[in-house]
Image (tube, helix red, strand yellow):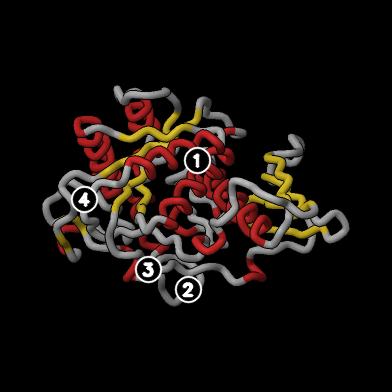
Amino acid sequence: MAAPSLRTTQPWRFRLDTDSRTVHIHAAADRARRHTDQVGRAAHLSEGCAVLNLRVVAVHFGREPVTRLLPCPDRPALLATVRLAESVRDAPETGLYETVWRRHSSRSPLSGRPLPSDLLTELIEAAHLGGATMRFSGRHDTERELCATWEVEWRNRADTDRSAQSRRLVSGPHSPSLGLPSAALGPQDALDPLPIRNLGGHRHPEVLPARAFEPRPLLALPSAAHDRRTDWPRAGQALDRALLLATRRAVRASLLHQAMEWPDLRRALDGLPVDGPRGHTQMVLRLGYGPRGPASPRRPVEETTADHE
């Protein structure tokens, strides 16, 4: 439940089979965002993050999480199963449990202080362990990525359906467990280089609170070798592992997902001349030191569990 998801939609349901000690993770189709996630890629990424969180918790309590992604082709809503096998001695998820509820997206200005090289290596290795790659952008590539993200902000503002959907996701009297509180929206960049998402769908974002952000943000691009439905939850696990590792080292992160929502701009990011392995970009991460972001609401347990498939 604490896993990151696009606009905090939390698009998952869990069912425990007590006989086999297996948790079934299902897609919650009613929580899809058809305007910003037309093919369901972001939902699958989010669900992969939830699977990784479940693995972390299982290892913490001494269980071996035997995981199968998309185990039944004839049941596409069944995204994964995690069988809680007997005791485990060591696993890549060891030591991450305490970070699960401490991980929050931070949309505030960061210091711009460089991250240590050993942490960058750890994040690259963590992505590789999950079947993905992590590449860090140089200065010129960062400028192009930010320009692409700004382009999305302009497009979304002009798109009536997307703007209306964003406004509905901001917390209000409809549900205290959904949406985003105003404290989580964060300020806009007063100097304009960093396009923090206009989460409230404001038609005139220039009236929003603004502060100066770091002039050269550190951007990381988790990527997958392919871009199939089977690759998305695997990339989500790699993304979540990187976020938990960063949290453990007091590094804050925010997700710049905007360019992922427009096929032409996402392809442009795939084609950027970044050193290292090529792939299909799954997310743009902004990393750095700074204030911890506020927690977003989470659905109550009864909304995230299912009695039957």
Q: Residues within 10 Å of mark 2 (few under 14, many from 20)?
A: few
Q: CA distance from mark 3 to mark 1?
A: 25 Å
**Residue placed under numbered mark 1 in the picture:** 126
Kindly report the distance in space between the C-alpha atoms of the residues bearing marks 4 and 1: 23 Å
Which image quarter: residue 263? Answer: top left
| Residue depth check, mark 3 versus mark 4: number of the one nearer the observer | 4
Relative to 43, is 280 above or below? Answer: above
Quickly name the residue at label 2: 174
Residue 79, given in percent of the width and then of the height, sits at 67, 45
Residue at 15%, 47% (x, y): give it: 215
Q: Amino acid at mark 4?
A: Gly
Task: Give the side of residue 254 with respect to residue 75, left or right.
Answer: left
Q: Earlier in the sequence, mark 1 or mark 2?
A: 1
Q: Assign a secondary structure to mark 1.
A: helix
- The numbered mark, 4 or 2, whose residue comes first in the sequence reads 4
Q: Is residue 35 left or right of residue 298?
A: left
Q: Identify residue type, mark 1.
A: Ala
Residue 116 disc label: none
Between 234 and 195, the one nearer to me in the picture: 234
Q: Which mark is residue 112?
A: 4
